[in-house]
Image (cartoon, helix red, strand yellow):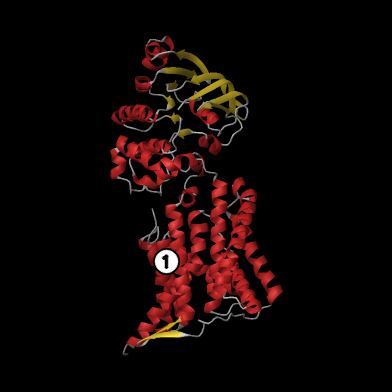
Amino acid sequence: MAASLTISGLDAGYGAVRILEDVSLSVREGETVALLGTNGNGKSTLMKCIMGMVKPSAGSIVAEIDGTKFDLVGRSTEAIVDLGIAFVPEGRRLFPRLTVVENLLMGAFRPFARPQIEKNLAFCFEVFPRLAERRGQLAGSMSGGEQQMVALARALMSAPRLLLIDEPSVGLAPLLVSRTIDKIKELKDGAGLSVLMAEQNFTQAIRIADRGYVIVHGKIEFEGGSAAELNNNELIRQFYLGA
Amino acid sequence: MELDLNLLGNALVSGLLLGGFYAAVTVGVSISFGMLDIVNIAHPAFIILGSYIAYIANSTLGMDPILASILGMPAFYLLGMAIYHIYDVSFERRGDNGLRGLAFFFGILFITEVTLVLVFGVDYRLVEASYIGVSIHLGPIDLPLRLLVPFGISLVLMGGLHLYMSRTFIGRAIQAVAQDPLALRLMAADPSKIKRIAFGLSLATASIGGAILIIIQPVEPSIGRDYIGRIFAICVMGGLGSFAGSLVAAMALGIMESITSTFFGPSWSPAVSFGFLLLTLAFRPSGLFGRA
């Protein structure tokens, strides 16, 4: 059941542009960790590095899953997912011309997840009853909030141990944002996951996070050991609360 | 003019049977063009290759052409995987798959055709089987087995592929791969591998299509070109990637061609069928069964 992630000294960029500089962070077993920062500070790049979609130029990314350590650097995206690390990307990236249930079944492509399909599908429909009602609808014809539900449920279908979520609130109405954040907590508790969530919406993210990191211009500027510590931090007041 | 009901009935039935044949030769393109966005205009050439393999097995070993085509499927599958691999490395990964990819398949079309001409010459070839030349008579309607057997094989092929695409993990991944290859990676699937399998399957259907073709009519190397237009028309008319749509469109086209050529002469049939394609696209741009 155990899954953790340790990143140390990570540098990454695109061509001559350096995006991440000496980033170190960790997600311990069963934690929800928020990666906080406004647009363009490197949150998505960090997520992509973990998932093997961007190659870091230095540093290490190690995941420990059920007692075995895996160095993620140099592995392909599909191999990383196959280890039990699921990723909900920004913009959700559903298969628009497949139905809701077909999208969810695609999530269970990973051989390890296939025997658990019935159980995981029932869990997804329990958390998102709306998806059960809309199971036959094409994913591309759904609203943004519903699509985010499909994206989260699809990631859960791969029976992951570690879940990465990039900007779950983007493009959603304020009410939906808080509902989506609640659902992430529900999924995490129900499936026994460790979660790393990149988010700009500080107040929402901090509601469910155990700890958090603030990333500014590609560097971790502050590490909060608790939600309260983050709330009272000077840097965060300056960036988010305008004080 | 009095309408001859017998003639109409026979035209309808033979159109329906012809439609079954069209469906079988189109299904490979429904996969490659409809699901993978690969414009494999060489597909008809591979169907002709399938015809010649059935012809060799039939004329030298006396083997049933359908059995020969089933035995030939694994070889076609591997050939398809190899061709996709070359296409992937040379064009798709570089983003050159538009016009250059089309030229690549145009080249394969000619190479296949010319090779067949060099080996077999340009004479028409045909096969022999117990069911060729026999007809079942249902009242005034003739059901030639030469058309009925391919029709049955075609339905089995379409049904089997439909089940594979909708019920298996690889099948669903094939449907998903052109929609978002990156998202497919996040499902722990390698898009190149999925496409290789799909293209292999697409060519494997050409083996069966070829056998069916040579049962229905004698074959010479360039005859495939007669079908390129029809095959892509059926694929688009039915809705890209939809087997059910292709089947319905193939039947509709078969019936229209058969009725037109029975009552107005064969030269009118392409005009009527392509007119129907234009009307379909005007009123339903994503095809009869397309997922918009």
Residue under numbered circle 1: B247
Rendered view: A93 above or below B110: above
Whole-percent x, y for residue A23 in the image: 55, 19
The answer to whether residue A112 is visible is: yes
Question: Image check: B211 left or right of B254?
Answer: right
Foreground pick, A171 / A150: A150
Q: Image quadrant for the N terminus of chain A? A: top left
Query: Along the horizontal axis of the image, is B128 left or right of B174?
Result: right
Provide residue B57's location: percent of width, then percent of height.
63, 74
> Percent x, y for residue A93?
44, 40
Pointer 1 chain: B
Q: Amino acid at mark 1?
A: Leu
Left or right relative to B103: residue B143 = left
Q: Taking A51 as reference, is A102 above or below it? A: below
Does residue B149 sit above or below B233 in this rendering?
Answer: below
- Residue at screen point 59% across, 69% down: B50
Q: Nearer the viewer, residue B136 or A46?
A: B136
For residue B255, side relative to residue B129 (left or right): left
Give x and y (percent) for residue A169.
37, 29
- In the rendered view, would you say A226 is above or below A184? above
Q: Helix, strand or loop at disc 1?
A: helix
Label total for image: 1
Q: Residues within 10 Å of mark 1 (few under 14, many from 20)?
A: many
